[in-house]
Amino acid sequence: MPLRPSPRSRGPKPTRIDPDQILDAAQAVFAQDGLRAASLRAIARHAGCDPALIYYHFDSKEALFGALLGRRFPGVLREVEELSNTRDMRPTSERLWAVLLIYHRHLKDDPGIRSMIRGEIVRGAEGLTHLIEEQIRPITTCVRRIVEQGMTRGDLRPDLQPLLVTFFLVKMQLEILDVLPVVLPRLMDLPPDEAVRTGMTAWFELLWRGIALDPSAPLPPLPDPVG
């Protein structure tokens, strides 16, 4: 009896896979292609699993996107909430610097999440704005509270718009994490960690001189962001 030819493979066979592996793959694909252009098949290929396994854990691309945000930002929120407590009587400069350190700790090693969020905000993908706002708005509210407390305590100018101060503080920190480790080593012959340290300190000093009630007052010693 002639042997029958083996059936041709139709892609990766189902295997057990950890949901975090799927999320890692989704983050990489979303950062590269954007959520609208990304496909579950591409995510499955990146994760090395069958697409059916993704549906077992997540029912849509939007659910994957929400899970990615939920994996990263609650930790940021917890720390910034604690920092915004009115019982924290440290100088406002120290508290705002601490905000940058929180973002640095949680996001410095995750360019994929930064790229993914930036891309979806710019694209304005319908249905995703509320997912991003659910995670970012509470953090923004806490930082804004620190700014408002600084204005009340006389550390900051009374004519500031707290929401804009919050935006510039956080937005520039994300740019520092993405750009300075690449650009400054070439321009100033600095290693990446030193580039981030230099860039963060210089940016904060510039911002502080613009928002402080007394721009000539010296800043307190600031903890090393990469130490």
Image (cartoon, grey):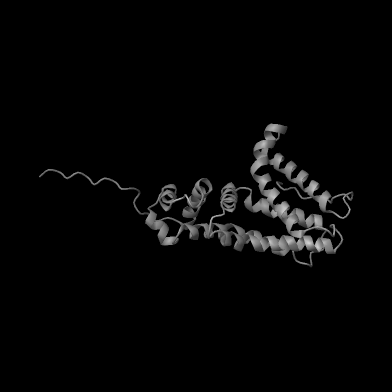
* Corner quadrant of residue 185: top right
Q: Provide residue 149's location: percent of width, then percent of height.
A: 80, 63
Residue pictured at 71% horizontal, 64% vertical: 82
Residue pictured at 63% horizontal, 51% vertical: 107
* Corner quadrant of residue 3: top left
Q: Provide residue 68's location: percent of width, then percent of height.
A: 54, 57
Residue pictured at 89% horizontal, 53% vertical: 214
Could you tell whether 117 is left or right of 193 in the image?
A: left
Closest to the observer, 189 or 66: 66
Q: Is residue 67 above or below residue 210?
A: below
Could you tell whether 19 is left or right of 81 in the image?
A: left
Q: Is residue 145 above or below residue 178?
A: below
Could you tell whether 132 is left or right of 207 in the image?
A: left
Q: Is residue 25 above or below residue 155?
A: above
Could you tell whether 152 is left or right of 188 in the image?
A: right
Q: Quadrant of the N terminus?
A: top left
Q: How many numbered discs? A: 0
Q: Provide residue 178's location: percent of width, then percent of height.
A: 64, 44
Q: Provide residue 141's location: percent of width, then percent of height.
A: 70, 63
Residue pictured at 57% horizontal, 49% vertical: 119
